Amino acid sequence: MASLVGAGVRHHQPFHLTWKGLKGLNALGRHLLVELKDCDAEILNNVEIIRNTLVAAARRAKATIVEDRFHLFSPFGVSGVVVIAESHLTIHTWPEHKYAAVDVFTCGTALQPMVAVEYIIKQLKSKDPSIVEMKRGLSVTNPEPVPVLRDVLDGNLDGNKECYDGVEELHLVH
């Protein structure tokens, strides 16, 4: 399957702060936050299709499925989770807006979370998907003072620019 990244899917570069001279920075997991806009509304309101899609996505990513749970809301919308040994896949749909919010959180290096995401995008027929990747569970074996994130949000980097070396982009969702 050809990758959707670079073919219309906006995949924001992972956001994380990198400090000069910091050693031992390790992430425990990858968290893909997926915004699926302009999806097929009928699919988004079909609990069986949504369940089958997320379970198949987990399998395609080489995840170990523990269990799954899905619920159809009245008058519409589906929420669900596939618990995997390596973490989880979750979804909530708003068929009336042709929108779905999907999280794919994986730990370890053996899984292929982008394979799961690409499959979900295709199955829900999203015409306007976007993906933001976050590194989760950062651990530092040689800690140094952490710059205040508020400085990043306020754009106040004066005097501390070396602390923010490696910051690629920050996306705030309102």
Image (cartoon, rainbow, N blue to C red):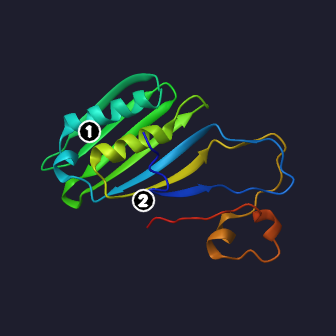
- The earlier-in-sequence mark between 2 and 1 is 2
> Mark 2 is on which residue type?
Gly
List the single residue furthest toward the left: 75
Position in image of residue 22 (x %, y %): 83, 50
User: What residue lies at 79% left-to-right and 70% top-to-bottom?
Assistant: 161
Position in image of residue 28 (x %, y %): 64, 37
User: What residue lies at 44% left-to-right and 50% top-to-bottom?
Assistant: 4
Give the residue at mark 2: 8
Asked if 161 appears above or below 19 in the picture, the reply is: below
Marks 2 and 1 sit apart, C-alpha to C-alpha, by 23 Å
Position in image of residue 138 (x %, y %): 68, 44
> Mark 1 is on which residue type?
Ile
Give the residue at mark 1: 50
User: What residue lies at 24% left-to-right and 57% top-to-bottom?
Assistant: 98
- For label 1, the crowd category at 10 Å Cα-Cα, with few meaning under 14, some 14 to 19 and many 20 or more, is many
Element type where label 2 sits in the image: loop
Between residue 9 and residue 32, name the one nearer to us.
9
The quadrant where residue 95 appears: bottom left
Describe residue 3's horizontal placement relative to residue 147 as left or right: left
Asked if 1 appears above or below 108 in the picture, the reply is: below
Describe residue 88's horizontal placement relative to residue 42 as left or right: right
